[in-house]
Amino acid sequence: MKNRSVAVIGGGVAGLCAAVALSQRGAHVSVHERAPALTDVGAGLQLSPNAGRVLSELGLDAALDAVSVRSAGVVLHDRAGQQVASLPLAAHRPGAAFRMIHRARLIEVLAAAARDAGATIHLGHQITDPPKADLLIGADGLNSTFRRKLNGAEKLFFTGQTAWRALIEDSIDDPFARVFMGPKQHLVSYRLGSGFRNIVAVQERPGWTAEGWSHEDDPRNLRAAFAGFGGPVPDWLSRVGSVGIWGLFRHQVARHWHDGRHVIIGDAAHPTLPFMAQGAVMAIEDAWILAQSLDAIADQPAALARFQAIREPRVRRVVEAANGNARNYHLSGPARVIGHLGLRTLSRLAPGALLRRFDWLYDYDPVAERVA
């Protein structure tokens, strides 16, 4: 990658992480973001060890630890707030970093690292003509123009689910992400750094809301939708002052990720539902494997083909797992009773078996991937 020119379109997690990884390998990288600032859109993220290994290799551990909270795992609750199962993911992987972080803090860390490595970041930059560069990376998210150029128009599938996202102030020390499951709806919440708690609440409903995080809603609608939930949920929702709402759509994993000079990564290539907390994580994995492939294989089209060949099977499995969780969290009737009983039994009698179900996801090491 020494002295190769790279233009990255999009200043989100995927684009900035790619800028860091490529700049550290000697590429001349420019990042082009149409927003006038790197904003707080997106609220909370969970970063599992498969992404943590990349971030550590990029030298970002100390910076991330200063602005994030370490996660001990996930606790599943029923609608009333009673515990169904505990997944102490961190204890199952001593030394592996599970982090909970505000997206804006992650963006700040990545942007600083990209600039330190020599990348330039252009804000408020609406791309009309593609920059002149040896490689153009489309990290431009769900509505990627690069994806359309490579794959044409596509029809989206509305899942029938609408999600609310909110932040509240909360300084209570709780190292677990908590999932509250009810018929046709669920709520996820976890602490972030700087005294905030992230809330994502999903409900099946006949109407739909447009994709994106910028649509505002009345907090009273969120409280009414989850009025029957117990435990800490009523208190959390009573403190919500503003809330965003968006519709959840299924996208196909793109068939074509590159054409030899252009390549798409992150949500531009493989948007996923949020039910495995792997959207940002897959973007980070993408950025590393792309940089590794380009650095190890001199022929750029061959390097991009190798990148897609490595990444596509894995992201397809993650997308399918997220789709499965969308169903599992919303069980109702006899299926819900049987499902929750099974989880309670496994959690009590065979917790290791429950935890090992996620080994394929969290124990993967992108840094050790052989690209050539």
Image (spheres, grey):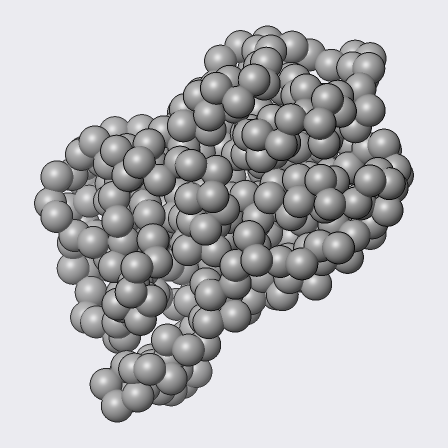
> Where does residue 27 sit, x and y in percent of width and height?
68, 25
Name the residue at 85% across, 32% down. 261
- Tell me if I can see residue 329 in this picture: yes
Q: Residue at x 57, y 48 (%)?
A: 285
Instruction: Give the side of residue 49 with respect to residue 321, left or right.
Output: left
Q: Nearer the viewer, residue 114 or 165?
A: 114
**Residue 96: which quarter of the image?**
bottom left
- Residue that extends furthest to the left in the rendered view of this protein: 172
Q: Is residue 275 visible?
A: no
Expressed as whole percent of the image width and height from the top left, the position of residue 155 reads: 78, 47
Q: In this view, does 193 lie to the left or right of 129?
A: left
Image label count: 0
124 shown above or below 72? above
Q: Quadrant of residue 95?
A: bottom left
Q: Where is residue 249 in the image (x, y as percent from the top left)?
A: 62, 49
Where residue 281 sits: x, y (%)? 50, 48
From the viewer's side, name the closer residue of 259 and 6: 6
For the C terminus, which image quadrant?
Answer: bottom right
Write the residue at 45% across / 77% down.
357
The residue lying at 25 percent from left, 33 percent from top is: 66
Image quadrant where residue 145 sits:
top right
**Quadrant where the N terminus lies?**
top right
276 displayed left or right of 320: left
